[in-house]
Amino acid sequence: MDHEASETTLRFVGTATTLLDLGPFTVLTDPNFLHQGQRAYLGKGLFSRRLTEPALQPEDLPRLDGVLLSHLHGDHFDRVARRALDRSLPVWTTPAAARRLGKWGFDESAGMSTWESVELERDGWRLRITSVPGVHGPGPARFLLPSVMGSVLELSRPDDSPDAGRPFRLYVSGDTLYRPWLREVVERCGPLDAAVVHLGGTRVLGLTVTMDDRQGVDLVRLLGPGVTVPVHHDDYGVFRSPLSDFVSRHAEADLAGTLRLVERGATVDLGNPARSNPEP
């Protein structure tokens, strides 16, 4: 299926913060607007200092249809987002995060159980957002970390469109670790056109709590997206696995899909791998 670049794009703000333009819909992910040098609260009395400057601030954002939040950590929903984002926006997130956001006045927060979906419609276009599994910590440590969700965003064109056919499917990993049971994402949702993969190899108290380069490549091999866009890899001191390691390992693995890198402030096409952005 051929997708126009204007229909499925990602603009990278920093960390895991992106603007997803999917047909007529615009979704903000994991809003983190802290400036370089400021500290994000990671829970349990832990902080990490931001090493980079985000490309946008809340006042720079376009009109949004909603916010997709993988979990409630200070590098994914920070005090700037809490203060400045429109509290009438829908926020699709975990049940635990939705309860906290509700207390902060984000009354449209929707806590989504695993495999639960919501749908948006506009001018015959449909965007279906499905919560999919994730795990933020190894073994018993997962109980010390907030619950996390991945997401599949499925864009369907109007039925009378000449290009109507199989929907475009985008997977956003959230801060999950690699697990073989994540194969269920494609088994239940269908083949993936693109994936936004949270990397960084985050280490907290000696534990790795986000995918490093090896786990990231294992996940790409498992799910087989047409296009992979890595994010969440160099913004905080707790990130220990550089993007360059993932790029090298991805090349060595000789995976079938296309790897597309995106700088903060730049936009990348999530569609047809043959059209743009050659492999790095």
Image (cartoon, grey):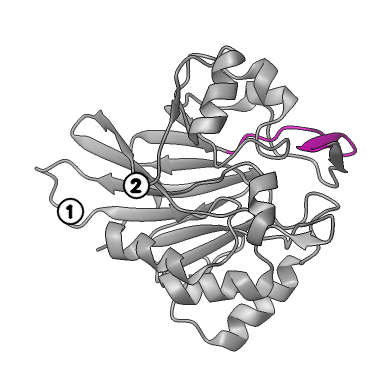
Q: Residues within 10 Å of mark 1 (few under 14, many from 20)?
A: few
Chief SS of the magenta region:
loop
Q: Are marks 1 and 2 in contact (CB under 8 Å)?
A: no
In the picture, residue 191 is in which quadrant?
A: bottom left
Q: Quick check: is 146 in the magenta stretch?
A: no
- The residue depicted at 86 percent of the width and 47 percent of the height is 51
Residue designated by label 1: 163
Do we see residue 200 in this rendering? yes
Q: Horizontal and vertical percent for residue 147?
A: 57, 43
Q: Horizontal and vertical percent for residue 198?
A: 61, 56
- The residue depicted at 60 percent of the width and 19 percent of the height is 85
Q: Point out the stretch of residues depicted in magenta.
A: 30-44
In the picture, residue 193 is in which quadrant?
A: bottom left
Q: Which labelled disc corresponds to residue 225?
A: none
Q: CA distance from mark 1 to mark 2?
A: 28 Å
Q: Horizontal and vertical percent for residue 79?
A: 74, 24
Q: Secondary structure at mark 1?
A: loop
Q: Horizontal and vertical percent for residue 114?
A: 40, 45
Residue designated by label 2: 115
Residue type at mark 1 is: Asp
Residue type at mark 2 is: Trp
Q: Is residue 35 left or right of residue 145?
A: right
183 in relation to 82, above or below: below
